[in-house]
Amino acid sequence: MMNTRQRGRGSKYTDDFKRQLVGESRGYGVSVPIVSKRHGVPTNQIYAWRGDERFQPDGSAIDAFTPVEVADEPDAPAPPRSVILPAPRIEITLENGRRLSVSDGVDARFVLELARGLAA
């Protein structure tokens, strides 16, 4: 990590460093918290820089548009028709702090007896 602060009263980060962090925070698969941790800069500061048009990596305003062309891919595989979801679960936290996790289809009487035993 480079020392990008200027020393003395009212010290602040350089404009180039701010642009660098704003650019990093807008990268694919990157978030402001990741950039914040990497460079030791508070997340709220990076969000403020992202909202300031002076610190946009290419100097353009945030509300500028980028042309995009969307085209169908004829050979693209079809999305799966069914997705296997995990079985529904219910989690019960007892008064003593113990947790009971129950999946769908479990007998209610069994759950009640188990909860009573764990609460004792």
Image (cartoon, rainbow, N blue to C red):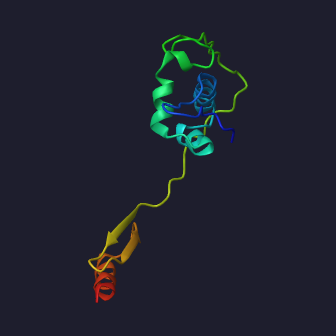
Residue 118 in the image: x percent, y percent? 33, 85
Name the side, left or right, on which 89 lies relative to 13: left
Image vertical order of residue 92 relative to residue 84, above or below: below
User: Which quadrant holds residue 78?
Assistant: top right
Q: Residue furthest front?
A: 8
Horizontal and vertical percent position of residue 70: 62, 15
Of the pair 110 and 10, the residue shown nearer to us: 10
Q: Residue at x 63, y 12 (%)?
A: 69
Residue drawn at x 65%, y 18% as measured from the top left: 72
Does 119 sit above or below residue 10? below
How far across and how far down the image is residue 41, in percent?
54, 40
Q: Nearer the viewer, residue 75 or 95?
A: 95
In this view of the protein, can residue 114 be seen by the observer? yes
Seen as rendered, the residue at the extreme right is: 75
The residue lying toward the viewer, choosing from 114 and 51, is 51
The image position of residue 53, as x and y in percent, is: 50, 16
Give the quarter of the image for residue 120.
bottom left
Q: Count the marks.
A: 0
Question: 10 above or below 73?
Answer: below
Question: Which quadrant of the figure has residue 29?
Answer: top right
Horizontal side, residue 101 vs residue 119: left or right: right
Residue 106 visible somewhere in the drawing: no
In the picture, the quarter occupied by the N terminus is top right
108 in relation to 17, above or below: below
Residue found 48% across the figure and 13% down from its top = 63
